[in-house]
């Protein structure tokens, strides 16, 4: 017969709470995207103007708003599945980690998109966030030197590798710039949030 000590019960409770908080934040993020698209549809696309407008000062606000805006529900659906899947893999580390990764990818990736996108274009969509989540998961294990995370990164490459690569190729109506800088920002997030750096901060 096995017994569960109070310490183990407390540890499991903490793990459950951490995972729950991360998943709740993910639900909020995705929910805001769907709510924004409903409002955008009702207002005949009025929200799309708040995307990233390349090299225009007024377009800087889009760095924060663009991931929540989409060009119709088809665009939103295509981003939701990988966003939820990859986001959930990060969310198990807690809301703080998911928020940190999301913030780094949104700001760094968005600024890069604003900087090099073609003139007079507006970039919207969460695909840059998807690329950032993916690159974070792929490289996190290398920075942390954890075999389990490395194996998870390999699985991410196997499942989404071809889609990620094709998303970096120039295509009409597709922001490869957003994909590229989202991916770069994800690598930066994996490095900044590595275990050794977090321990130094503490």
Image (cartoon, rainbow, N blue to C red):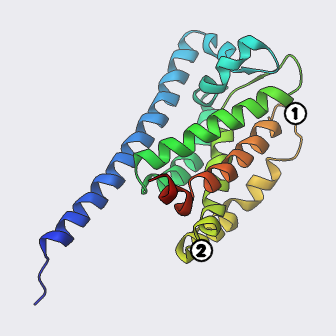
- Tally the numbered discs: 2
- Label 1 belongs to which residue? 172
Q: Residue at x 89, y 41 (%)?
A: 170
Tell me: 154 left or right of 199.
Answer: right
The dot on residue 82 is: none
How far across and down, in percent of the image, does residue 8 sit? 20, 72
In terms of depth relative to the viewer, which is nearer, 8 or 90? Answer: 8
Above-or-below relation of 47 to 127:
above
In terms of depth relative to the viewer, which is nearer, 12 or 152? Answer: 12
Tell me: 113 left or right of 70.
Answer: right
Earlier in the chain: of badge 2 and badge 1, it is 2
In terms of depth relative to the viewer, which is nearer, 201 or 62? Answer: 201
Report the Cα–Cα distance between label 2 and label 1: 35 Å
Which of labels 2 and 1 is toward the front?
2
- Label 2 belongs to which residue? 151
Q: Residue at x 75, y 13 (%)?
A: 57
User: Local crowd at mark 1 within 10 Å, few (<14), some, or many (≥20)?
Assistant: few
């Amino acid at each position: 017969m096995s017994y569960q000590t109070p310490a183990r019960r407390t540890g499991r409770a903490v793990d459950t709470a951490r995972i729950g908080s991360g998943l709740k934040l993910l639900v909020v993020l995705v929910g805001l995207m769907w709510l924004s698209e409903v409002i955008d549809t009702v207002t005949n696309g009025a929200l799309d103007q708040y995307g990233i407008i390349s090299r225009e000062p007024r377009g800087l606000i889009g760095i924060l708003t663009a991931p929540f805006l989409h060009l119709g529900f088809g665009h939103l659906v295509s981003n939701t599945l990988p966003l939820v899947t990859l986001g959930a893999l990060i969310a198990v580390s807690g809301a703080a980690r998911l928020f940190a990764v999301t913030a780094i990818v949104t700001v760094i990736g968005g600024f890069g998109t604003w900087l090099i996108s073609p003139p007079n274009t507006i970039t919207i969509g969460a695909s840059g966030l998807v690329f950032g989540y993916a690159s974070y998961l792929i490289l996190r294990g290398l920075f942390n030197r954890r075999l389990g995370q490395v194996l998870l990164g390999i699985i991410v490459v196997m499942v989404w590798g071809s889609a990620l690569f094709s998303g970096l190729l120039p295509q009409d109506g597709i922001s490869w710039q957003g994909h590229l800088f989202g991916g770069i920002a994800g690598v930066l997030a994996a490095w900044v949030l590595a275990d050794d750096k977090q321990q130094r901060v503490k």
